[in-house]
């Protein structure tokens, strides 16, 4: 019998942090420090202190940290079983923080103060700084939580070449946006090259070790773009300029015209980064085990046809919105017409084209109704930003409509794009299910491989879907409603 | 006597409901802790008695009804606060009492281990939801998200794969043991038969799986609805107290509508999101997502319509409905958490042994990987996706489907061999495939004996057997024919014929000073003037003359091509005009036809005809006869004169229960042609495979099989370079038009787009490049022909 077998395990701080609730609480404290610093800058700590009937900022800070630790413990328990790396856990933290904004400042805090809940839009708009703070809290908590529970053996650090690839992707996408939208369409994007380089460098730091398809990467990149906007577009400018935070609605409205380019930048970086990785593997990797074993081939072609069909169904769902809000003539402007019939044809053709791209990007990524809906609505949101806010105005002879007012005015189009995405995702999933359900297996080994792939997809995808729809529906209302 | 503590608790709560009207008689406000008056005086004891009955009888569904009644009454009371119409004549204390009783009874009714939970989860024989293996186990589309506790997955996998009888890992029972051990076979590795399982049609198993499918969906929806209601209590109460549900404006529903909405949202989340072990975060985020989408659907789209306004989806409308967005988001998130909790309890109850038994699926074994067998397997896959789960095993001695109509083009070097063959594993990706030969069939014990490689033979059991073994060349016992004739049945035949012809050209080019031997080398004889024979002679002609420029030692008039046919016209399957056309075109090229005579014998260097003529040749191709696989002779069913199995019009083999036959090996009566058998063509085999799968599924489901009826679409025969004849639905085509038709149709009929693209590329390259004369096998010119040089009748 060895001594190790007889010695009881010592309760070291490190072993304590292995427990998800404790690690979550500790991470929550760190997240609370970040959020608390922001609250101190914004002067909102007394609001928290009012729960215990005082207006002391110090009491408010302590209370805030206690709440942050409690909520952080909940986060730890919630995501303890998620097989997500640091980058993916970030999105769990973001949606968790966003959810607590609805639960806390909008609901519980007013109730504890004996007031009405702040569920109306003006109240929510006034609490926009709190939302940003909650998102920062969630993101910080998530990253620290992963750091506490990190298993060194399983940690894969991005290589230098990966970082260079990210940098190249960032510069390339930013340059493309600058050339295409600044020089040719008049959008003010002089700032984007530098931001693109930084965002491109940061992307592989968070997600670089993950191998995934281009479709999920684009969705992830879009959410990453939002985070970049939060940091570089909303937080840093007033901090650097005035030495203080300004997350007010007014500041957010000013920064709103940079939100769509940030989203496009993030999506583009993810797509180019993933594409460059695939190209590098295809050119330089001589071990076929490192490559995708299934070539696009026949099933890819069939999936493309299904994508067109699913896109058509989604387009018909979108048509209902377009008819009711009389948007078909605008779409017809792409081909220089004002006829609703021409608009309908153009709209359906575009819907099919996007459906084909969905098939190419998201083939073998859905395995149930939830994943079909999740990828579909997320992709629909990407196309709202790229299509309705950017390409459509440019093609019809204008500049991209990225202002807060324009974003809010395009809300019907957002609803249509989300409906389109949901129908597209569901129909494509059903077609895949009907003909080639990749998750259907013949033996245990195959089942294990499929289960591993599902686990990979589910590492952070549900958080991505929820967070994407959350920001899609709330941000336009909060800054433009 | 109530022994179950859960029932006792339900009785206690029911008793509390029964006695609560005592408060109605309280006259002192100091003692009147609960306000009970009006309708509540009757409602509380009624529901309490209901709960007590459920406790006494042990039927938790009655407890569930009582709990739901209390819960609804609580919500109703909630809706009456501050209104003049207070139906229950109660107050906050009444609400609290009813809510407490309702939640308590609901928790008891849905507690793990209760019969109700078993019912919601399916009965004991219900398989675990979510394990979906095509051709192995197929259930419904919620494969992953629903109740797949790890342990249940392992169980179903073992049932489905590892320990199934098909593995033949040896076991205590032989093939016949399932029927009382009436059989005893001296086989070293005898498969394990499912203990006690009768080789029945599978109807009961399929019914169990169908029940499971419905219950699985219903279960998720039901749990989701319960979770929706549970989540609605805090959210709805909050909204109610905040006066958000007083008026149905701006996308915020009234309380009654909110309850409906909550139930529907919960059911939808239950169906879509479902359950995964350790999936708390997934469930919560899925609930948030669905809550947000529900807001889009209801508050922005349906609610305006309910108020007589078209939806605008404008930012103003969204801003007005913002409270509903917050409510929907919180409600969705809570639903996700509650669903996960409820379904975790259910999964835990299963792990405790309540519902782990997995009924076996009906076992289908398909023997033969040709058009008919593969078509049947593909159809079973499709049926499995549509809710007819079966356990399908496809056995074939070749692991690919050979597109036989283009075999002659492989022999003529116009197509690459693998381009006209599609891997079975790719064509039926979700079916279990066994590469091997069936040696024997035991129709009494319902098992086929499979030999695969060097492994010992094993018995593969079945409930339904589909025989699609095709046909083999039939040499009519003519002397020397089997030994010296080439055939064109398999891919290897076409490849070896091509090798042989090119090898002979190589030899004739530089040697053979003996004129007789040179004639033999350059004479090509084909027996049979049907589709295959006609196409082969035309393709050989194209091959030889297409590559002759590589062989300067051979003059174009030297090669001789002879087709021997027993009838007076070739292509009897076509109309006489097209047959005559084909004959004329081929004769015009110099191909000789010996009609009305038969091959009598063959040797390594010549062919003897029935009229006594002798044709000196080194190349003799036999296409004049096929017969069903000899395997069928071992069966006890009725065989036709040619050895094929007689089937009825439903494709069932006569006299053999559970055995079906399709394709070339079956003699299937054509009811539209007075019972004459269908011809053995690919177009028939494909349809027969589809119908036999449908019929087996129908029989398993307790229905009646359908008759096979099919009218031949048409016949296409290639005649070599840019020429063909075709007869489609009575319309006749010939020449270039028929050739284009022939190529276009066969290109479209090739299995899989990959093969179509490859064949198309082959054909396009054939337009600009000569045919390949590479000899794939190493051979010397001397060794290209058999050593034996004897002529027929010359020992």
Image (tube, coloured by chain):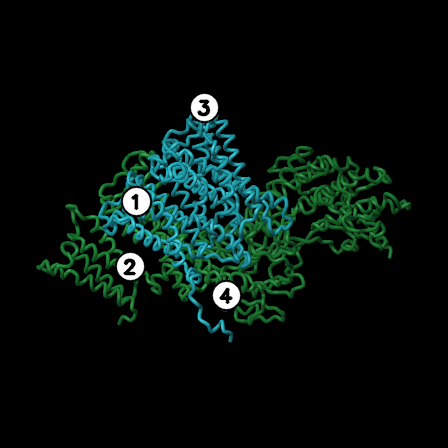
Chain colours: A cyan, B green
Q: Is residue B2 left or right of residue B732?
A: left
Residue B535 visible = yes
For mark 4, name the chain. B
Q: Dots 2 and 4: beta carbons under 8 Å?
A: no
Q: Give the number of the mark in front: 4 or 1.
A: 1
Q: Within 10 Å of the Cα at label 2, are there few (<14), some (14-19), or many (20+) other Cα atoms?
A: many
Check chain identity for marks 1 and 3: say if they share one. yes
Of B750 and B320, which appears nearest the observer? B320
Find residue A337 and name its label. Answer: 3
Find residue B198 and name its label. Answer: 4
Say what secondary structure mark 1 lies in.
Answer: loop
* Residue most extreme to the bottom: A1
User: Which of the two labelled residues, at mark 2 and mark 4, occupies the earlier sequence position?
Assistant: 2
Q: Give the number of the mark in front: 2 or 4.
A: 2
Residue A93 spot, x, y in % from top left: 41, 49
User: Which of the two labelled residues, at mark 1 and mark 3, occupies the earlier sequence position?
Assistant: 1
For mark 1, name the chain. A
- At 50% from the left and 66% from the top, the residue drawn is B197
Q: Is residue B770 left or right of residue B127?
A: right
For mark 3, name the chain. A
Numbered disc total = 4
Task: Give the CA separation, mark 4 to mark 3.
Answer: 71 Å
Task: Give the CA separation, mark 2 to mark 4.
Answer: 42 Å
Residue A402 spot, x, y in % from top left: 41, 32
Residue B695 visible = no
């Amino acid at each position: 019998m060895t001594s190790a077998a007889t010695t009881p395990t010592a309760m070291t701080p490190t072993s304590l942090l292995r427990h998800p609730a404790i690690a979550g609480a500790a991470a929550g404290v760190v997240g609370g420090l970040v959020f608390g610093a922001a609250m101190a800058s914004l002067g909102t700590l007394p609001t928290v202190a009012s729960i215990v009937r005082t207006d002391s900022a110090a009491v408010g800070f302590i209370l805030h940290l206690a709440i942050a630790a409690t909520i952080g413990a909940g986060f730890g328990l919630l995501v303890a079983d998620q097989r997500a790396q640091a980058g993916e856990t970030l999105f769990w933290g973001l949606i968790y923080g966003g959810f607590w904004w609805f639960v806390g400042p909008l609901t519980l805090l007013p109730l504890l103060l004996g007031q009405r809940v702040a569920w109306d839009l003006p109240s929510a708009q006034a609490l926009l700084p709190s939302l940003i703070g909650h998102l920062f809290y969630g993101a910080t908590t998530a990253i620290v939580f992963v750091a506490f529970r990190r298993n060194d053996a399983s940690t894969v650090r991005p290589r230098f070449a990966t970082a260079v690839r990210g940098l190249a992707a960032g510069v390339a996408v930013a340059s493309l946006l600058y050339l295409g939208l600044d020089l040719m369409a008049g959008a003010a994007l002089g700032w984007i090259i530098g931001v693109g380089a930084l965002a491109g460098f940061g992307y592989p730091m968070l997600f670089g070790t993950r191998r995934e398809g281009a479709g999920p990467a684009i969705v992830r990149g879009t959410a990453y773009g939002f985070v970049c906007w939060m940091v570089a577009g909303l937080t840093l400018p007033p901090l650097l300029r005035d030495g203080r935070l300004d997350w007010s609605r007014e500041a957010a409205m000013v920064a709103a015209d940079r939100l769509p380019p940030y989203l496009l930048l993030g999506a583009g970086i993810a797509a180019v980064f993933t594409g460059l990785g695939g190209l590098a593997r295809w050119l330089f990797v001589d071990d076929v085990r490192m490559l995708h074993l299934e070539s696009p081939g026949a099933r890819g072609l069939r999936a493309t046809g299904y994508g067109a069909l699913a896109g058509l169904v989604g387009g018909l769902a979108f048509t209902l919105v377009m008819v009711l809000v009389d948007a078909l003539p605008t779409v017809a402007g792409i081909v220089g017409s004002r006829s609703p019939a021409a608009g309908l044809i153009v709209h359906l053709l575009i819907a099919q084209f996007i459906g084909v791209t969905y098939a190419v990007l998201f083939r073998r990524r859905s395995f149930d109704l939830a994943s079909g809906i999740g990828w579909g609505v997320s992709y629909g949101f990407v196309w709202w930003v790229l299509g309705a806010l950017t390409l459509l105005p440019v093609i019809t002879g204008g500049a991209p409509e990225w202002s807060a007012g324009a974003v809010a005015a395009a809300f019907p189009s957002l609803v249509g794009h989300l409906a389109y995405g949901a129908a597209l995702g569901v129909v494509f999933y059903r077609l895949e299910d009907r003909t080639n359900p990749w998750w259907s297996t013949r033996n245990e080994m195959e089942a294990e491989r499929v289960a591993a792939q599902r686990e990979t997809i589910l590492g952070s995808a549900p958080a991505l879907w929820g967070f994407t729809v959350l920001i899609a529906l709330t941000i336009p209302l909060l800054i433009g409603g | 006597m109530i022994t179950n503590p859960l029932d006792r608790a339900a009785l206690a709560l029911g008793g509390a409901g029964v006695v609560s009207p005592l408060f109605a008689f309280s006259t002192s406000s100091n003692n009147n802790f609960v306000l009970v008056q009006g309708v509540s005086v009757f409602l509380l004891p009624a529901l309490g008695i209901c709960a007590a009955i459920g406790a006494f009888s042990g039927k938790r569904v009655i407890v569930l009804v009582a709990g739901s009644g209390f819960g609804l009454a609580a919500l109703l009371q909630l809706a009456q606060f501050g209104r003049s119409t207070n139906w229950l004549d109660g107050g906050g204390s009444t609400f609290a009492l009813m809510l407490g009783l309702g939640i308590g009874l609901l928790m008891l009714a849905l507690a793990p281990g209760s019969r109700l939970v078993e019912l919601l989860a399916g009965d004991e024989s219900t398989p675990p939801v979510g394990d979906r293996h095509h051709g192995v186990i197929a259930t419904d589309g919620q494969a992953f998200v629903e109740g797949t506790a790890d342990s249940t997955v392992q169980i179903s996998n073992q049932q489905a794969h590892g320990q199934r009888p098909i593995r033949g890992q040896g076991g205590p029972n032989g093939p016949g043991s399932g029927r009382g051990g009436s059989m005893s076979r001296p086989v070293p590795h005898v498969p394990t038969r499912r203990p006690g399982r009768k080789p029945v049609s599978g109807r009961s198993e399929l019914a169990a799986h169908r029940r499971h499918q419905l219950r699985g969906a219903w279960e998720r929806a039901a749990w989701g609805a319960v979770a929706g209601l549970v989540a609605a209590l805090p959210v709805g109460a909050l909204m109610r107290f905040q006066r958000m549900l007083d008026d149905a404006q701006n996308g915020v529903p009234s309380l009654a509508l909110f309850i409906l909405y909550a139930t529907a949202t919960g059911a939808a989340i239950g169906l879509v999101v479902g359950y995964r072990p350790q999936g708390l975060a997934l469930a919560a985020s899925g609930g948030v997502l669905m809550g947000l989408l529900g807001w889009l659907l209801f508050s922005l789209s349906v609610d305006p319509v309910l108020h007589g306004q078209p939806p605008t989806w404008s930012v103003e409308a969204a801003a007005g409905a913002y409270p509903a967005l917050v409510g929907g988001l919180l409600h969705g998130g809570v639903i996700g958490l509650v669903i996960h909790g409820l379904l975790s309890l259910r999964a835990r109850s299963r792990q405790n042994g309540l519902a782990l038994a997995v009924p076996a699926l009906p076992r289908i074994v398909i023997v033969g990987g040709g058009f008919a067998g593969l078509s049947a397997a593909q159809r079973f896959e499709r049926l499995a996706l549509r809710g007819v789960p079966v356990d399908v095993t496809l056995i074939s001695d070749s692991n690919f489907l050979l597109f036989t109509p283009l075999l002659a083009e492989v022999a003529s070097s116009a197509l690459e061999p693998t381009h006209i063959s599609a891997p079975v594993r790719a064509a039926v990706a979700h079916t279990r495939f066994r590469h091997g030969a069936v040696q024997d069939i035991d129709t009494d014990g319902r098992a086929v004996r499979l030999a695969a490689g060097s492994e010992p033979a094993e018995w593969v059991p079945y409930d339904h057997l589909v025989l699609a073994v095709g046909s083999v060349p039939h040499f009519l016992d003519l002397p020397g024919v089997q030994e010296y004739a080439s055939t064109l049945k398999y891919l290897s035949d076409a490849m070896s014929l091509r090798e042989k012809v090119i090898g002979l050209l190589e030899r004739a080019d530089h040697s053979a000073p003996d004129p007789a031997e040179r004639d033999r080398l350059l004479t090509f004889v084909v027996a049979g003037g049907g589709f295959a024979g006609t196409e082969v002679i035309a393709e050989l002609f194209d091959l030889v003359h297409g590559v002759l420029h590589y062989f300067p030692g051979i003059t174009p008039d030297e090669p001789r091509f002879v087709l021997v046919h027993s009838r007076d016209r070739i292509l009897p399957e076509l109309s006489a005009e097209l047959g005559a056309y084909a004959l004329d075109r081929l004769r015009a090229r110099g191909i000789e036809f010996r009609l009305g005579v038969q091959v009598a014998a063959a040797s390594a260097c010549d062919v003897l005809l029935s009229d006594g003529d002798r044709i000196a040749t080194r190349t003799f191709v036999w296409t004049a006869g096929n017969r069903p696989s000899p395997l069928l002779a071992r069966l006890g069913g009725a065989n036709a004169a040619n050895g094929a199995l007689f089937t009825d019009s439903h494709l069932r083999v006569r006299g053999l229960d559970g055995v079906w036959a399709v394709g070339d090996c079956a003699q299937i009566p054509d009811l539209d042609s007075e019972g004459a058998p269908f011809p053995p063509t690919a177009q028939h085999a494909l349809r027969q495979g589809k119908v036999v799968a449908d019929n087996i599924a129908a029989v398993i489901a307790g229905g009646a099989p359908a008759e096979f009826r099919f009218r031949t679409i048409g016949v296409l025969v290639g005649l070599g370079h840019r020429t063909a004849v075709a007869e489609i639905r009575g319309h006749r085509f010939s020449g270039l038009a028929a050739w284009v038709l022939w190529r276009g149709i066969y290109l479209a009929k090739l299995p899989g787009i990959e093969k179509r693209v490859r064949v198309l590329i082959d054909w396009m390259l054939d337009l600009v490049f000569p045919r390949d004369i590479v000899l794939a096998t190493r051979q010397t010119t001397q060794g290209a022909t058999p050593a034996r040089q004897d002529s027929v009748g010359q020992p």
